[in-house]
Image (cartoon, grey):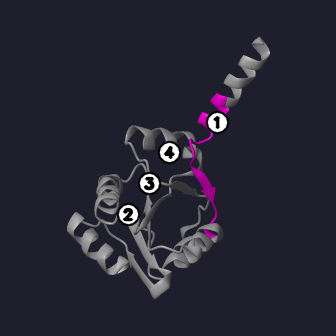
């Protein structure tokens, strides 16, 4: 019985330490996720060390949940360094109550992945991609969005 209980706790601790649901994604997998999205999608690129990124995430979450509930999906794509995945990102997200789908982009060469998201992306964050595949809508923002800008852009995305 002790072995079973011990085994259970080892599995539980390993599960917690592997990222609490933070998925590792390549740029190809992210492109497929975006391409296959059936609903309007907001892809927010951020990092734990980016103050403007961290500042805008709560109003992304609240605006999408309160005003576009179920109409728009949101995914946070962490661009943190490899040694932050998964523990530091997971811990940070837990502290900030980021209960939003979260992935870590397993790419370190911005010259490779940035143009695959948008040809004009210099690599600055925060950055946000808005996509509605049903109406061929795709818009990219390499800046922190204000709550008013976000709501206006979400209306254009979702309509």
**Can residue 111 be spotted in the picture?**
no
Report the Cα–Cα distance between label 1 and label 2: 29 Å
Q: Which residue is mark 2?
A: 126
Under circle 2, the secondary element is loop
> Looking at the image, is mark 1 or mark 4 nearer the viewer?
1
Residue at 42% in and 49% down: 48
25 or 62, which lies in front?
62
Q: Is residue 67 above or below residue 99?
A: below
Q: Which residue is mark 4?
A: 89
Image location of residue 40, percent across then percent down: 44, 74
Report the Cα–Cα distance between label 4 and label 2: 16 Å
Q: Quadrant of residue 7?
A: top right
* Residue 52 placement, left or right of 48: left
Q: Quadrant of residue 62?
A: bottom left
The reply to whether dot 3 and dot 1 touch (C-beta < 8 Å) is no
The mark found on residue 47 in the picture is 3
Specify the segment rendered in magenta: 12-27
* First-in-chain label (1 vs 4): 1
The mark found on residue 15 in the picture is 1
Report the Cα–Cα distance between label 2 and label 3: 8 Å
* First-in-chain label (3 vs 1): 1
Image location of residue 159, percent across then percent down: 34, 81
Residue at 51% in and 76% down: 117
* First-in-chain label (4 vs 2): 4
Q: Residues within 10 Å of mark 3 (few under 14, many from 20)?
A: many
């Amino acid at each position: 019985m002790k072995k079973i209980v011990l085994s259970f706790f080892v599995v539980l601790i390993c599960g917690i330490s592997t990222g609490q649901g933070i998925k590792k994604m390549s740029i190809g997998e992210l492109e497929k996720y975006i391409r296959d999205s059936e609903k309007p999608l907001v892809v927010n690129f951020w990092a734990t060390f980016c103050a403007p990124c961290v500042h805008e995430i709560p109003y992304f979450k609240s605006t999408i949940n309160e005003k576009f509930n179920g109409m728009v999906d949101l995914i946070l794509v962490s661009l943190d360094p490899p040694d932050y995945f998964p523990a530091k990102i997971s811990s940070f997200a837990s502290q900030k109550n980021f209960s939003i789908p979260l992935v870590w982009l397993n790419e370190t060469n911005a010259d490779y992945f940035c143009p695959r998201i948008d040809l004009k992306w210099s690599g600055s964050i925060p950055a946000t991609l808005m996509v509605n595949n049903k109406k061929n809508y795709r818009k990219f923002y390499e800046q922190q969005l204000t709550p008013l800008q976000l709501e206006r852009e979400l209306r254009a995305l979702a309509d």
